Image (cartoon, grey):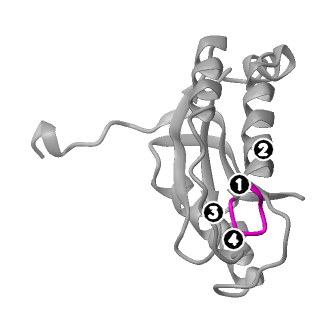
Amino acid sequence: MPASAQTPDPVPVDVELALMVDASRSMRPDEQALQRRGYAEALRSPNVISAIEAGLLGRVALTYMEWSGSNTAKAIVPWMLIETPEDAFAFAAALEAPLKPSGGRTSVASAIDYGADAIRSNNFNGARQVIDISGDGPNNAGRCVDAARAAAVADGMIINGLP
């Protein structure tokens, strides 16, 4: 295979973490900004940085995506390798970009699907694969949540709900 067609080996990490954040119409712009600010502050926290460094490999892969209805997830911060405080601070700074309101219905199932697809298609190899979903409402669009959850769990992923 020509060098241009080869993909690099996946980077081993302690965890691949997809942060899937609700941006549906039930979320006011101030609530969306609060979520981003909270994640940014957490990434700058010495406790979080120490936890990352204390892992077996001392690094995690992280992405931040906002979602609402079916087929509406978008990566606000694409996958990044976090292994130093500077990496965590850079990710946090990217979260502070101006907010562009989205809206739409609430498809928790699509959030799971997007998070799972993002993990399957990234160039990392995590000892754990985790989807954190924050949301403020029930699934009212898209496919059944149980089916989306079952597919991700069957692939060995952990799903956390952050209401």
Q: CA distance from mark 3 to mark 2?
A: 13 Å
Q: Which residue has dot 4 on it?
A: 154
Neighbour tally class for label 2: few under 14, some 14-19, many 20 plus, Cα within 10 Å: some
Cα–Cα gap, marks 3 and 4 = 22 Å
Image vertical order of residue 51 relative to residue 66, above or below? above
Q: Is disc 3 in contact with disc 2, using a CB cutoff of under 8 Å? A: no
> Which residue shows up at 63% across the image and 31% down it?
96
Residue 141 percent across, percent down from the top left? 68, 85
Left or right: 120 in relation to 127: left
The residue beneath circle 3 is: 67
How far apart marks 2 and 4 lie (CA) works out to 29 Å
Q: Nearer the viewer, residue 130 or 3?
A: 130
Q: Confirm or deny contact between disc 1 and disc 2 (CB under 8 A).
A: yes
Residue tagged 2? 35
Give SS at disc 2: helix
| Residue in the image at 60% along x and 24% along y | 93
Q: Where on the picture, by quarter, is residue 90? A: top right
Residue occupied by mark 1:
21
Magenta range is 23-28
